[in-house]
């Protein structure tokens, strides 16, 4: 017998949530004493988040994930997994995984353990343990393994992130600056202001770094790109970047100068456990 929890909304809608390996969700109407049939898995092969009809995973609401949902979705994206594959690995219904990623939700420890195993991470990481601590202070693995990443794997990891660091030369010496970026085609692009520090990258060879640290598991990876930075000024090229870019510079303000880095060398390294 599986026990579920009941949640109420201000629209008098009742949602029955059944967590755990056989997780699923079901709607019922306040005062009706009956419930519609459970929502069926989506047949959309793209498996991307979308606004569901009433009774679907998102309950007809715009996605508004909680912290755990965001971490699950981010870990799934890093692994290149669809929701259907992740749900299969974790032994849960795809509808429940969609609900978890798109809406604030409390989950059982059993669910977190299953998801952590399916995503190759830890329960602590999914719950945000150590998120406010400086990286690198965890204890090193007993049997660490340092390995190189291939070119294709480096490019794939670059495409999963949206924050990197560009190293530039300035009159006052070298500087490393964080920027929000996109990968469009073979280029790394970011927006900045003409008088900003990242603008010093223009017309010079620069280094661009992206990394990811799993503090709870004492492992991580880094990708280093070396290439020529240039200003993108042609109207058609600028419009193409505007249409295809997904990031917005976090500092805000007028940042309409597009800078493109054309990689000439890409290298990467990864630290994992010997057992992996």
Image (tube, helix red, strand yellow):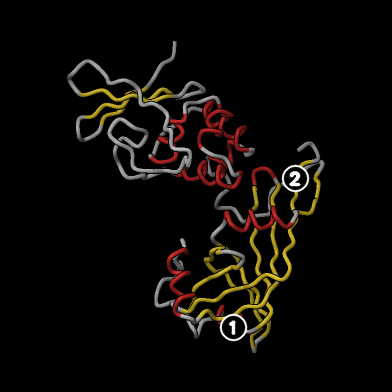
Label 2 crowd (10 A; few <14 / some 14-19 / many >=20)? some
Disc 1 to disc 2, C-alpha distance: 36 Å
Query: Exactly how many numbered labels are in the figure?
Result: 2
Q: Residue at x 59, y 29 (%)?
A: 89
* Secondary structure beneath label 2: strand
Specify whether 230 is left or right of 268: left
At which x and y percent is residue 178?
A: 57, 69
The residue at the far top in this view is: 1
Label 1 crowd (10 A; few <14 / some 14-19 / many >=20)? some
User: In the depicted view, which residue is nearer to us: 131 or 43?
Assistant: 43
The residue at the far bottom in this view is: 171
At which x and y percent is residue 165?
A: 61, 68
The residue at the far left in this view is: 31
Q: Which mark is residue 87?
A: none
At which x and y percent is residue 249?
A: 46, 68
- The quadrant of the rendering that contains the C terminus is top right
Specify whether 124 is left or right of 265: left
Q: Residue at x 29, y 36 (%)?
A: 53
**Tag 1 and tag 2, C-beta contact below 8 Å:** no
Q: Which residue is mark 2?
A: 272
Q: Residue at x 69, y 48 (%)?
A: 138
User: In the depicted view, which residue is nearer to us: 145 or 24?
Assistant: 24
Q: Is residue 184 visible?
A: yes
Q: Is residue 68 visible?
A: no
Residue 224, quarter of picture? bottom right
Specify whether 173 is left or right of 194: right
* Secondary structure beneath label 1: helix
Q: Which residue is mark 1?
A: 200
């Amino acid at each position: 017998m599986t026990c579920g929890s009941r949640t109420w909304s201000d629209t008098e809608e009742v949602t029955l949530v059944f967590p755990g390996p056989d997780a699923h969700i079901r709607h019922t109407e306040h005062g009706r004493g009956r419930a519609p049939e459970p929502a069926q898995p989506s047949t959309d092969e793209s498996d991307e988040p979308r606004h569901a009809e009433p009774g679907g995973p998102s309950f007809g609401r715009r996605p508004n994930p909680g912290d755990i949902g965001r971490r699950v979705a981010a870990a799934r994206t890093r692994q290149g997994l669809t929701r259907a594959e992740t749900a299969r690995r974790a032994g849960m219904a795809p509808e429940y995984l969609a609900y978890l990623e798109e809406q604030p939700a409390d989950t059982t420890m059993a669910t977190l353990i299953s998801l952590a195993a399916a995503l190759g991470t830890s329960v602590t990481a999914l719950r945000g343990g150590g998120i406010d601590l400086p990286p690198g202070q965890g204890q090193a693995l007993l049997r660490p393994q340092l390995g190189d990443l291939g070119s294709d794997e480096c490019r794939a990891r670059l495409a999963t992130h949206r924050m990197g660091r560009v190293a530039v030369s300035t009159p006052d010496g070298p500087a490393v600056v964080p920027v929000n970026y996109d990968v469009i085609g073979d280029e790394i692009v970011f927006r900045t202001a003409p008088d900003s520090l990242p603008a010093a990258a223009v017309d010079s060879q620069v280094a661009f770094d992206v990394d990811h640290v799993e503090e709870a598991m004492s492992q991580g990876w880094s990708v280093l790109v070396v290439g020529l930075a240039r200003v993108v000024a042609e109207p058609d090229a600028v419009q193409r970047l505007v249409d295809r870019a997904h990031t917005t510079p976090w500092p805000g303000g007028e940042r309409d100068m597009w800078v493109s880095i054309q990689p000439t060398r890409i290298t990467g390294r990864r630290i994992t456990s010997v057992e992996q």
